[in-house]
Amino acid sequence: MRYQKPTNPSGIQIIIKPLLAAVICLAINLAATASSLTSVPLNNPAISFKGAHYTQYGETFSPESGRTGPQFVQPLRFSEAVLQMPVQLLRFSPTIARWAAGIEMHLATTSQNIVITMDTLPTKRGRERFGIGQVYKDGNLLKDYRLKSAKKTVATQIHIQSLDGKKHHYRIMLPATMAVRITRLEIDKGAKLSKVQLPSKPVYIAMGDSITHGSAGLDGISTYSYPYLLASNLGYDLYNLGIAAGRVSPRLGTMLKDWEEIGFITLLIGYNDLSWAGIPKVNYLNFYSELLQNIRRSHPDTPLFCITLTFTTLKKSPKTGITPEEYREIVRALVKKFQDQGDKNTHLIEGETLNDITGLLYSVHLNIKGNQEVAQKLGEIIKAQLNQ
């Protein structure tokens, strides 16, 4: 067959040329944007955090280069003094306690471009983890972003754009399932940050394990957790002191002295003591009692809501044979003891009435529906009690 010359020999170029031009334009725009940005000191008073009672500033050191790297800021839920204690004394993992559950970063600016560089710190045993954070603009969800943590520190850039030139308030929710350091904040040259005037709210402290932490089944999205929903519904500022895999920790009660005033506290803890730790009932009673006493030393009149174990499909501890109901009885007895001694601000909430099997993920963790139900029911109980 005789070769026929194509009637449109440049047909492929018709497709390729516009694509190539678009790629070139995008590269030029990105380069122009990068060159027009300026770095903001991370200790700028216009940058604020909520949900973190402690803030750590410093510089990172790179063993590979032998040089000191950029300044960082890491908002923390727990004091460094507590995080340096032995695990045996704490009864929870300091590594997990550095995860950023419920922590949000606030800033306001007219800048059309914002670039935030975050480092996720190495995970325990180098396992890969992923978590989703959120960016809110003037109170509305603008975008989600995804962070990864692994064996080594992972750096990720979060790009935010607003081309109208107006001042906007940005709230950046950090993922609940990893430790995050902010290492760089860049805005347009000539633009400035403005201090966000956040409303003054009473403080709500949520104490507990992974159920409270919101570390399972929520992809790291803090706004899905029952403490965040409860705080939002009641108009409180949340400090989420839940720790995945945590057990009853009397030391955390002592740390609450760092808060001058607390509106109310919830305490939902014991599942890990029952299940994989398998501690005897007398130990659970003693740890729980000591925790309550430590809380009361610095906050004797703060409303404290002790929640018995929520609904679970676990029938008994695989190690001891102790049932969830036996642990619930211990909490009931302790609350009654404190009340009989004159503590009228310690209250009992029956956790098993807050959720059912439709709100469960696995045997005990709450799914999105479960978190919503628990937040709603807790809100009704706590609001009624606070209004008395």
Image (spheres, helix red, strand yellow):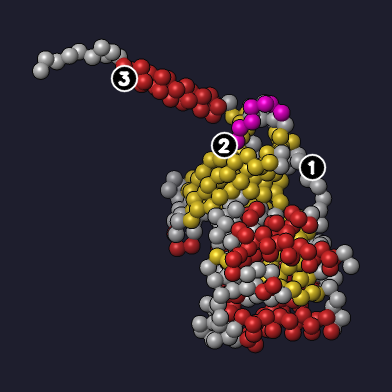
> In the rendered structure, which amino acid carries the disc numbered 3?
Ile
Disc 2 versus disc 3: distance between alpha carbons?
Answer: 34 Å
The correct choice, above or below, for 344 with respect to 202 in the image is below
Q: In this view, does 289 lie to the left or right of 215?
A: right
Which numbered marker is on residue 197? 1
Disc 2 versus disc 1: distance between alpha carbons?
Answer: 24 Å
> In the rendered structure, which amino acid carries the disc numbered 2?
His
Farthest residue, direction right:
388
> In the rendered structure, which amino acid carries the disc numbered 1?
Gln
Total marks in image: 3
Q: Which residue corresponds to the image point at 71% horizontal and 34% vertical from the top-left?
A: 168
State the residue position of label 2: 159
Q: Does the magenta stretch include residue 37?
A: no
The earlier-in-sequence mark between 3 and 1 is 3
Image coords of residue 100 (percent x, y): 61, 55
Image coords of residue 277 (percent x, y): 54, 79
Farthest residue, direction front:
1
Q: Quadrant of the C terminus?
A: bottom right
Q: Quick check: marks 3 and 1 in contact, CB under 8 Å?
A: no
Q: Which of marks 3 and 1 is in front?
A: 3
Q: Quick check: marks 2 and 3 in contact, CB under 8 Å?
A: no
State the residue position of label 3: 12
Residue range in magenta is 159-166
Q: Which residue corresponds to the image point at 81% horizontal and 69% vertical from the top-left?
A: 303
Q: Which of marks 2 and 3 is in front?
A: 3
The correct choice, above or below, for 227 with respect to 57 in the image is below
The earlier-in-sequence mark between 2 and 3 is 3
Q: How crowded is mark 2: few (under 14 residues within 10 Å), some or many (20 or more)?
A: few
